[in-house]
Image (tube, grey):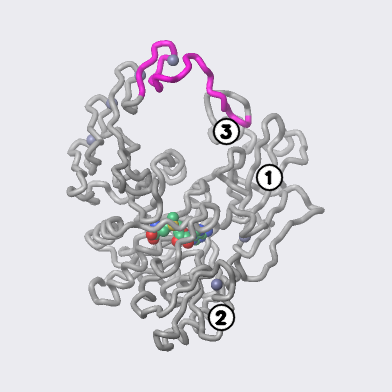
Amino acid sequence: MASSDHNVDVVLNGSATNVPSCPHGPALLFERYVKGTNSRHFFACSAFRDRKQCSFFQWADDKKNRCICPETDNTDSRGQTSFDHSALRKRFLKFKKLPRESRSVCCTCGLLLLPEEVDAHSGQAGHVLKHRVSLSSLRHPTTLFHPQENNKTYAQYLFSDSTVDFVLSSLENLNFTHVLCVGAPRIHEAFTLKHKDGQTSVTSLLLDLDSRYAQVYSHKQLCLYNMFNHHFFDLRGESIFKSFLREGGKGLVLVTDPPFGGMVEALAATFSKIQQAWKKLFETDASLPILWFFPYFMEKRISQCLPSLTMLDYKVDYDNHTLFNTKGGKKKGSPVRIFTNISQSSLPLPAADGYWYCEVCQRYSASENKHCDKCQRCTSKDGTTYTHCDLCKRCVKASRIHCSTCNTCDLPSHICGKVQPEGCHVCGALDHKRRDCPQKYQSTKQSGKKRKPSRHRTPTKAKKLKCQ
Ligand SMILES: C[S@@+](CC[C@H](N)C(=O)[O-])C[C@H]1O[C@@H](n2cnc3c(N)ncnc32)[C@H](O)[C@@H]1O
Ligand SMILES: [Zn+2]
Ligand SMILES: [Zn+2]
Ligand SMILES: [Zn+2]
Ligand SMILES: [Zn+2]
Ligand SMILES: [Zn+2]
Ligand SMILES: [Zn+2]
């Protein structure tokens, strides 16, 4: 399953009761489109978009052939016990007491090894071991363990120091006291260290799928969690999470940097659930402040789901992603931005990096992002300076020119009059994509009897793309 596949959408199944589960919690419902045929629904693992990691798959309308399930043990492809936090903690406490000479880590398995285990790992081809692990490096697990970069699994891209510093100082300046890091281990690590060293009063809780961190972080510091279905792997997880929300109160902020696999709707549903849990505890109508790191080109989909979020101009820098950093003199810089419901005027962006305050927009803009008096806003999205086209009545990328045949701005190399090859998968029209298809929404609103019975229809009460 890959939701980012051209012809697959995630379908939120809201309160449906017969949702099957895999070892990573309730599966997600997807809709697959094949041109010229009816769409078909299937359930697949929400955490992993790589069948090798979790092979769970079930057609929603296939009662006989219920499911192709992976074994429901708690091991992952590294062969590591994934979700038994207590056992991993016991091992860690033993590990810490060992003399430095006896402390080894298998970087391939992400496992801190007890002395009797070292030979088994060093003897296996492809396992990379580090020896003489210092206590200090145990305090920096995001550097100790190799990032798992597969985009269809953990998609671990780690913030550079400058981005970590920017996030920390912004949150401290806004007087937050509790940071809920959902898939943001470097922010968690930085706050945890600062707190231990008595340099901040801010405390942090990490919610993450990566069980390697369960060795170094206690239950109170980490909940093993799947952010695509708000699932806690440990029985204690949910109550630890709720206590953190309670303690945090008005000082709580949610910081999240999810894999960019495209399942925006599932993520938005999760963040809404967290938001609801927090609101319920305090019986408030206020919104839980959130910083959601995601590429700028997902702006439309994010604001469809969570309209209160706006996009900051800050370019998020990563250590281990060549496209997502500003190194090497790249013109546009990273495409990753921060989506937030915090007022932009209260989030100063670093002047040293060229960001400036636009009085009209009341927000900080990047140096290349010029305010357009005609559009009445700072218009650039992608890190280049846009120019205004009087005929289109909007700002466009500088690489576009106005074509009077097509009556729009386009690349000089475009072929005039050529229709877009990809129309809507549902109705075939060329002026919209299937996500925005009016027929699709109509057909979900219609009662079952109006539609022709079809084996392709899902038996669940699915609500399509219903965002909270
Ligand atoms: C793009 S990285 C973000 C890391 C962040 N830039 C940092 O430096 O702190 C994605 C993070 O989400 C975690 N993750 C991946 N899939 C997840 C899931 N289904 N549920 C929860 N966490 C997940 C990864 O382990 C990783 O920590
Ligand atoms: Zn799974
Ligand atoms: Zn190993
Ligand atoms: Zn402006
Ligand atoms: Zn303009
Ligand atoms: Zn134009
Ligand atoms: Zn043209």
Q: Which residue lies at the image location 45% right of the left edge and 54% below the top edge?
A: 258
Residue 417 forms part of the magenta stretch? yes
Residue type at numbered disc 2: Asp
Residue position for label 3: 434
Q: Which residue is mark 1?
A: 41
Say if 113 sits above or below 364 in the image: below
- The kind of secondary structure element at disc 2 is helix
* Element on which disc 3 rests: helix
* In the image, residue 420 lies in the stretch drawn in magenta: yes
* 213 in relation to 382, above or below: below
**Residue 316 location, x and y as percent?**
33, 50
Q: Work out how far the residue at label 2 is from the one at label 3, CA to CA, in angstroms.
A: 54 Å
Percent coordinates x, y for residue 19 in the rendering: 66, 56
Query: Outermost residue toward the right?
Result: 64
| Mark 2 burial class by Cα count in 10 Å: few <14, some 14-19, many 20+ | few
Looking at marks 1 and 2 on the same chain, the residue that comes earlier in the sequence is marked by: 1
- In three-dimensional space, the C-alpha distance between marks 1 and 2, rounded to whole angstroms, equals 47 Å
Q: Amino acid at mark 1?
A: His
Tell me which label, 2 or 3, sits earlier in the chain: 2
Residue stretch in magenta: 400-426
Q: Is residue 243 left or right of residue 163?
A: right
- Residue depicted at x 23% and y 49%: 349
- Estimate how packed mark 1 is, as few (under 14), some (14 to 19) or many (20 or more) residues with alpha carbons within 10 Å: many
Residue 162 on image: x %, y %: 27, 56
Q: Name the amino acid type tagged 3.
A: Arg
Residue at which label 2 appears: 119
Magenta segment's dominant SS is: loop
**Mark 3 packing: few (<14 Cα in 10 Å), some, or many (20+)?**
some
Q: Position of residue 356 (x, y in %)?
A: 19, 42
